[in-house]
Amino acid sequence: MASTSRTRTGRGRGRGRGRGRGSGSSSLPPPPSTLPLIIEEFFIVVYEDPLVKKVRTPKKFADYLDGKELAKVYLRATGPRLWTVEVLFDGQGRMYLDKGWEKFAIAHGVDFGCFVHFKYEGDDVLTVKVFDGTMCRRYYYSDDEDTDDESDDDVKPCIHPL
């Protein structure tokens, strides 16, 4: 009679013992489908002239803000300056960055091929990072400086805690 050798497969010794299926309490997190959906960050890739068209945010982000229907948001790239941008909702669940976006885009060199990352900080503030076509982040120092030709109408005052 030929002998057969068994090769052990699976997880090895102890399988089925201790904490496993049906063992009562579990320290595993709940499945993703039961967790609340929090969309705080998103990005856009600029495929069209950002100065001609308003910018559409992802639908999931608009859904996340559902019920708030913001009239405006404040964009921060660097420094304390916040750029005021009007927000439009089209009634079909889509949200657009509209008036004020053009000034922000010009000041930060947003152009065709740019990758723009947004992070919602609450209080209607979005932190923005702009990456150029080489996928390198652009840094700007002009947000800290005031120029004579700019109006303060599009700037939200920034209060720093002491």
Image: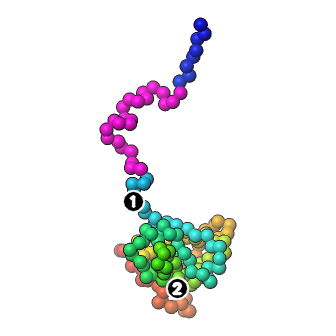
Disc sitting over residue 36 in the figure: 1
* Residue 32 drawn at (x, y percent): 43, 53
Residue drawn at x 65%, y 73% is 47
- Quarter location, residue 147: bottom right
Disc sitting over residue 99 in the figure: 2
In the image, residue 14 lies in the stretch drawn in magenta: yes
**Numbered range of the magenta stretch:** 9-31
Whether residue 109 is visible, yes or no, is no
* Residue 130 drawn at (x, y percent): 59, 71
The three-letter code of the residue at mark 1 reads Pro
Label 2 Cα neighbours within 10 Å, binned few <14 / some 14-19 / many ≥20: some
In the image, residue 136 lies in the stretch drawn in magenta: no
Q: Give the SS element for disc 1.
A: loop
Residue 52 vs 133, above or below: the answer is below
Residue 13 vs 87, above or below: the answer is above
Q: Give the SS element for disc 2.
A: loop
Q: Nearer the viewer, residue 154 or 58?
A: 58
